[in-house]
Image: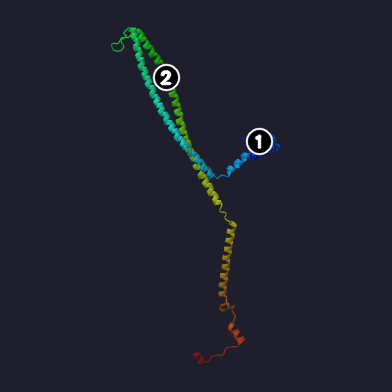
Amino acid sequence: MGCSLMGCSLVKKGILGTALGAGALYLVFGTSAPSYVSTAFHKVRNNAKSVVPVQFEIDRAREEISSLEPAIKDGIAQYVQAQVEIESLGREIAAMKANLETEKTSMKTLRNSLETGDFRLAGTVTYTAEEVKGDLARRLDSYRLNNRLVENKEATLKAKQKTLAAAKDQLAQMATTKKALLTKIDGIEARLKMIETTQASRDFNFDDGALARAKQSVSELEKRLDVMARVAQLEGKYSDSGLPIIVEPGRDVAKEVDAELGAPAKKSAADKSL
């Protein structure tokens, strides 16, 4: 089937671009070019994986573990089916062995009849020696064939029993592994929560310097208010209206006032009585 002119052109350009790119890498890195490409690819893949949230990976792991459940159930169904088949095969082998024992008894009877010459094997019917030999040969061939069949079935039974035991161990191991994986995932998720809580607490970046400055400002305001209160108290105590003056000992203030302003007039007896 041919391609259109434009389609063929695009294909050619793509091939040419790839060839040129590979040629450029070879020119720059030589024979080490493939290792550089491989390293770059793995690095890009690892970087892409590192940006996937951890919780997303945890959820993905839980889904993968949950996907084991159908496999376990299917394995249980297969185990039970195999168990039923083994039990049926065991019963079949037991029945075949019982038939072989019955056939062995019949052959012994026929063999004894050849020794005794009594060929009346069933009721009053009489057989010849050749007929007895023929019947004995047929029975012997059938006995040998069925005996080999029993041996083969017993070998098959043993193989099936081993397979069944291995399947049982595998189911138990799968269930145990699933439980252990779930326990690990729970632990990883709990650890993630602790880390996220720690990171969240670190997101609260308190400015200790601002807090210290605020405390200093409040302290300075308290000091300033204390100074203002004491100044107001002292101004009220030592104002002009109530300024206390301490008189030096031995000083006659009344005499000094009389000398400065003149002695006051003496009151008469009548004034004193008033």
Which residue is disc 2 drawn over? 149
The answer to whether one can see residue 184 in this image is: no
Residue for point 52% across, 42% down: 60
Residue for point 57% across, 74% down: 235
| Residue type pointed to by label 1 | Pro
Q: Quadrant of the N terminus?
A: top right
Find residue 34 and report its horizontal and vertical position in percent: 66, 35
| Secondary-structure class at tag 1 | helix
Distance of label 1 from label 2 (alpha carbons) = 61 Å
Q: Nearer the viewer, residue 262 or 153?
A: 153
Q: Nearer the viewer, residue 151 or 254?
A: 151
Residue for point 44% across, 35% down: 73
175 is higher (above) or lower (below) than 158? below
83 is higher (above) or lower (below) than 248? above
Q: Is residue 183 left or right of residue 249?
A: left
List the single residue furthest toward the right.
Answer: 27
Instruction: Specify few, some or many for label 2: CA neighbours under 10 Å numbering under 14, 14-19, or 20 or more.
Output: some
185 is higher (above) or lower (below) than 200? above
Query: Which numbered tag is attached to residue 34?
Result: 1
